[in-house]
Every structure is written in C-alpha cells, then in structure tokens.
Image (cartoon, grey):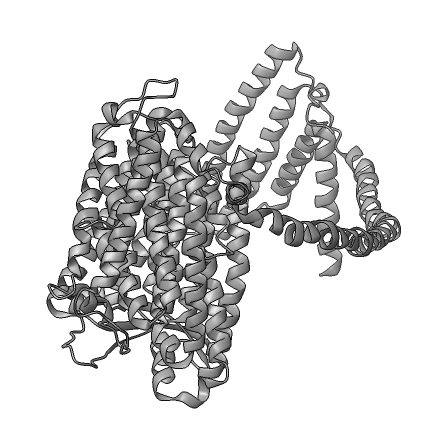
Amino acid sequence: MIVQPVLVVAAALFSLGIYGILVRRNAVMVLLSIELILNSVNINFILFDTMLADTLMQGQIFTIFIITIAAAEVGIGLAIVLMLFRNRQTANINEFDLMKW
Amino acid sequence: MVNFKPTVFAEGELVYTDGGILAEYAWLLVVLPFVAALVITFTGKYLPLKGAEVALTTIGIIFLYSAALMYLHITSGVVNEFFINVGSIGVFDIEFGWVVDGLSIMMYFVVGTVALLVFIYATNYMEGEIRYTFFFTSLTLFAGSMLVLVSSPTLIQILIGWELVGVCSYLLIGHYWEKKDNSSAAMKAFITNKIADVGLMIGIIILALNTGTLRISKILYQSTHDYEKLSTVAFVAAILLFVGAMGKSAQFPLHVWLPDAMAGPTPVSALMHAATMVTAGVYLLARMFPFYKAMAPDALDVVMLFGVITLLAAGLIAVVQDDLKKVLAYSTVSQLGYMVAAIGSGAYTAALFHLWTHAFFKALLFLGAGSVIHSVHSNSMLEMGGLRKVMPKTFATFIIGTIALAGLPPFAGFFSKDEILASFNHEGETTFFFIAVLGAFITAFYMTRAVSLTFLGEYRGHGHPHESHNLMTTPLLTLSVFAIASGWVNIPGVYTGFTDWVTTRKNKIVEYHPESFDLFALSSGLLAGLLGIALGYYLYQLQGSAETGDNKIKIQPIWSVLENKYYLDHFYFKFVIDPVKINISKAVDKFNTNVIDRFVNGFGQVASLMGSVVYNNFDQNGIDKLLNMSSTGTDNFGGKVKLLQTGKTQQYLMLFLGGVVTISLLILFIT
C-alpha cells in the first residue's frame, strides 16, 4: 500500500495551510488556510484508517465529524469577517488589534 | 442560679395562713411596675393616651391584687416570706424576695390605693404638660420602687428600694428642670437623702456583721432570743438606721428637702407625701420595731425626742407659709413627727395607724390643693380666696381632709391622733404629751388658716377659676370617703382590726395598745383641735382678709425665725455646703487639674510620642516600603510582559506554532 506519497501530500497541504495562516493578510484567506490544515488532517485519518483496516472505521467517522465542524467554523468565521468588514471597511487581519494591551 | 424556696412560718396566738397562691405570686406587685415602665418608655409615645393607659392598667392591677391580699389578710391572717438566692458574698447570702405579712400588706394597700387615684388624677392634671410620657414612666417607677422597699424581707433589698425611691423622687421633683429652682430642689432632696442613707448603709453593715445574716426576720429573731450577739452594737445600729429613716421620713433637722420638693408637679407631691416616699422611714422603724424594743430602748427615746421636735417645729413653720402646697408639706413633716414619736414611745400600732389614715387624708389634701392650683395658676394663698363658690367639689373634699387632719370625730385623723396621744399618756411622757397636744392645736390652726385663705372670703386673684375636670374630682371624692372612714378600723373597745392586721407578723410585737378610750388624752386632743379651728376661724374669717389675720400673729422675732425656717438652710449653707464648695471642692478641683490631669496628659504625650516613633520608623520605612516595593516590582514586570500582547492574531499564531514545534522537538529528542 502506498503510504509515503500520501503522507507527503498531507504534510505539504498542512505546511501550505500554516504558511497561509501566518502570511496572508486577508482574513478570508486565513480562513481558507485553516480549511487546508483540516483537510490535511482528514487525509491522514483516511490513510491510517485504510492502512489499519479498522473494522469500526473510526478514522472515516472522525473525518466526517471534522468536515461538519469545519463547515460550521467557516460559517461563523465568515460571518465575523463580514461584520468586521462592515465596521472597518477592511479585511486586513493586522488591523484587528483591539485586544492588545 | 436562682434558688427558689418558699418558707412558711406560724407563731403566736393568732392563727396564720401562708397565704396560698396569692402570696406566692405577690412578686407581681414588685415586678409589674418595672415592666410597665419599660413598656411606657419604648411604646408610650405611640399609644393613644401617651403611655398613661399602661401606667393606669398596671397600678389598677396592683390595687386589685393588694385589695385581694388585704381581704385574705383580714379574713384569715397571712404571714409568709419568700426568698430568691442570687449568690453570696463571704458568709452572706444575697437574697431578694417578698414578704407577705400584716405590715407589708397594709403598705401594699396604701400604695396601691393612693397611687391609683393619683394616677387617674394625673392623667388630667398633667394633660398637655411637657414630658407627659416620661412623667408616667417615673411615676410608675416611683410606686414600683416603694413596693420593692415595703416587700423586702432582707436588708439589702430595703437598701435597694430605698435608693430607687430616692432616684425616682429626684426625677419627679425635677420634672420641670428647665427652671433652676426646680432642679436645685431635686438635687437638695437627693443629697439630703443621700447623707441620711449613709447612716442606713452603715447601720445595715453593722447589723449584718454582728448577726451574720441579712434576713430581717432572722435579725429580729436574734434580737429577742440571742441577746449576746447584738447587745454591744444595738444602740449604734439602731441610731444609724434611724438616721436613714430621718432622711426619708423628713425628721428634723433633715426635713429641709421635703418642703422644697413641692417644686415637682402636684400629683408627685401627693404620692410622695402620702404613700410612697416619706412613709419609708416610718416603715423601716416599724419593720425593725422588735429589734428597737428588745435591744435598743435607749434609741427609742432618741427617736421619740426627734419625732416630737419635728412635729412641733414643722407645725410652727406651716403657720407662716403663704404657699398652699408648702403649708401641706410642713404639715406632712409634722404628722411624720407624730408617727416617729409614736414609734419612739413604743406604740407600734398607733404609728402605723396614723400612717394609714394620714396617707389618705394627706393625699386628698394635696390633690385638692393641686385642683385649686390648676385652676388659679398660682401657689400663693394670697391670690386665692372665695373659691368655695366656684369649686364646690374641691371645697367640700378639702374641708373633709382638713377636719380629718385636725382630728375631729368621726373623721380618720381623730382616731389615729388620739391613739398616739393615749400612748404618750400611758408611757408617762407628760412633756411630750403636751407638746403633741400643742401640735394638734397648731395643726388645726394652720389648716383653718389655709382653708380660710383659699376657699373663704373674697377672691383676690386675677384669673377666672373654675371647677376641675371629673377625672380630678372623682379621686378627690373617693379619697374623702377614705378620709372619713379609714379611722373606723381601729376604735378602742369597738373594733380593733387594724391592730391585728399590722401585728400579724413573723416576729412577735410587744407594744402598748389601749383597750379603751383614754378620756384625758381624747379630751385634750379634741379640745386642742377645736381651739385651733376656732382661733383660725376667728383670725382669718371673722377678722377679714389674710393681711389682718396675719398681722395678729406676726409676733417678732418669732415670726421671722419661722419664716426663715429656723435659719436651718442658712446654717447648712454656711457650715456644710459652703465649706464643702469653697474648700473641699476647690481643693479637689486643684488636685484634679494639677495632679490627675497632668498625669493623664503626661501619659497621653508619651503615648503620642511612642506612636509617632513607631509611625515614622517602623510603619513608614518598614511595612509601607515593603508593600510599595512589591507593588512597583509587579508594575514594572507587568509593563515589560504586556508588550507581548500585541493584538495581532498572526503573531500569536506564530508563537503558538513555535511552542508546538519546540515541544514536539523536545518530546522527539527526550524519548
């Protein structure tokens, strides 16, 4: 079974996500990067579920959970970003620093 | 720990009972007024009658209870004592309690009856006056204090009651304390009594130390059965107790407070002079009578001497007084002289009998005088006159009181005064007998003078006098019934119930009691009374106004000596008050400023110095610095650390990632 290439893909996806979170200034893009990270985790779950031939298919069930939660998270996140945009006329994440000392 | 043990005694010829439940609950008489005083103090102002209803209810209950006790006593005779042990000092048990016997029941009844009528009278008399509620509190306390005193089975309780009566009299005499004269009068009463109280206190201590007990009945038992213990100190103790009695019962020369006590409202005077305060001394002598009779007959002679001096001296002053209440006040002193002299002559019953009748007719006279004063707005008899027309009820009752005091049959005063005279005659005290007869003459004279100046002739005042309210005249009418009939309980040869009442005690009373009328004493007393009335009527009625009447008896220098009350007040001021004021008080004041104050100030300065040292060095430099340092340290550290909080999300994420990576690496390398 091909394990290594899939892991590499997942790791690459994860790294891309991290990069996106840390570097992108647009809040929407940051949210998208989070989706990338979640999906890389999903790939890993599926991979190890298949590899271990788990009869309960826990990996796949978790994946479904994660997708659901990701959907909810994106919904709330986009709503927050929308409100912020309305109030500030910008989606630049560096300008949302009200919580600083 | 309260030790409740009722004791029952039976001794003597008469059959006694223990009084049953009525005697057992007689403590209510003592406790109720104090409860009522508390209730009036806290709720009086919110009640519809401003607290008077509480006082009236209480005193009504006391009257009913004492009447029930009286009935029980008349029918079957009650002798009982109850003690509550509240602790002990050395060998002395400190016991409070109540005694239910002939003497105390008689006093309960007198206090209850007179107080009830005075209270009813006062509700109207004091209407609209300042401190109405407080007045009723004090009046209730006053009656209660007297009940503490007369119910006392131990000397310690007598002392407590004695002082309580003194305090309450102070409050009541000084009721209108805004005027300096009134508060001075209150002070005078209190201090004079206090001086006498020292005698009582030392007397009690001597008696207690020599008998080993504070119970009166035990002391009296020892004085008749155990001669040795007391014989050496009996005379001194008896005299000291009498000094105490001299203060409360206003015996010459300590009577000076009583006329000044007229500064109080008239109901107070009536209560004080009839039932609650001045009788205390006579009561004490009567209570301790077996002791006097058995152990200190010499002291009884002294008692009699002072009594006789008082009855004559005070009677003479009453003749020259223009203030209606002062006439009655000196009359009270004089009548107290009769009672004390009677005790001194060994006539126990006669003294108490006079106390009994005097309580009623003197209360009547005082309330009558109050009614007049209330209507005329003046105390001076020179501004009265002719009031018989406008105040018929007051006039009629006042006349009844006057005749009772002057001692004409069949009014109350006749029987009691006659019994005292008869006792003097029996004892062979010829001089004293004639002085007492002279006293009766003077009594009749000054009372006739008072009646003439107040009620007869023409009105000399300026106001428009009117008859008093029914609430005031009803007590007068009730008391006049007593003033007429209260003497009928002790008619020699006919009915001598009173003698049986008051001699029904745990300790046997040995005294002289006339079996039939002493015709010599009777005729002298009666003649003196009639002559006094005749002379008074001749001088003040037939001769016309107050001026001409007074002119006839203004014999110098006697008149001015009497007007200045034998210069006793001058004497006291010169030889007692001023020396104390000028020398001792000043010296004490100097000592106070120079020694005690300096001492206290020095202490204060040292303490303040020590305080500032501690403050500057220890507090400011030690504790405060430490606290400040810790707070500034925290502040600085926080100022540095807070810079991490940039509010930039991606920086946080960066740090978070760094942390995750670091931990991962650590785990990787360590495992």
Against A78, is B28 above or below?
Answer: below
Asked if residue B114 can be seen in this view, the reply is: no
Residue A68 image position (x, y, % from top left)? 46, 32
The residue drawn where x is 68% and y is 29% is A21
The answer to which of B431 and A62 lies nearer the viewer is B431
Give the x, y percent position of residue B652. Answer: 72, 34
The total number of labels drawn is 0
Image quarter hosting the C terminus of chain B: bottom right
Along the horizontal axis of the image, is B78 left or right of A26?
left
**Depicted B558 relative to depicted B78: above or below:** above
Q: Residue at image x 66%, y 15%?
A: A91
Left or right, residue A59 beside residue B287:
right
Which one is nearer the viewer's eye here, B4 or B365?
A: B365
**Quadrant holding the N terminus of chain B:** bottom left
Image x and y of residue A72, in percent: 48, 28
Q: Is residue B349 left or right of residue A10?
A: left
The answer to whether residue B346 is seen in the rendering is: yes
| Among the 4 quarters of the image, the one containing residue B668 | bottom right
Compared across the picture, whether B592 is left or right of B367 comes to right
Judging depth in this view, the residue of B241 and B435 nearest the camera is: B435
The image position of residue B380, as x and y in percent, is: 42, 30
Give above or below for B227 relative to B645.
below
State the residue at coordinates (20%, 36%).
B474
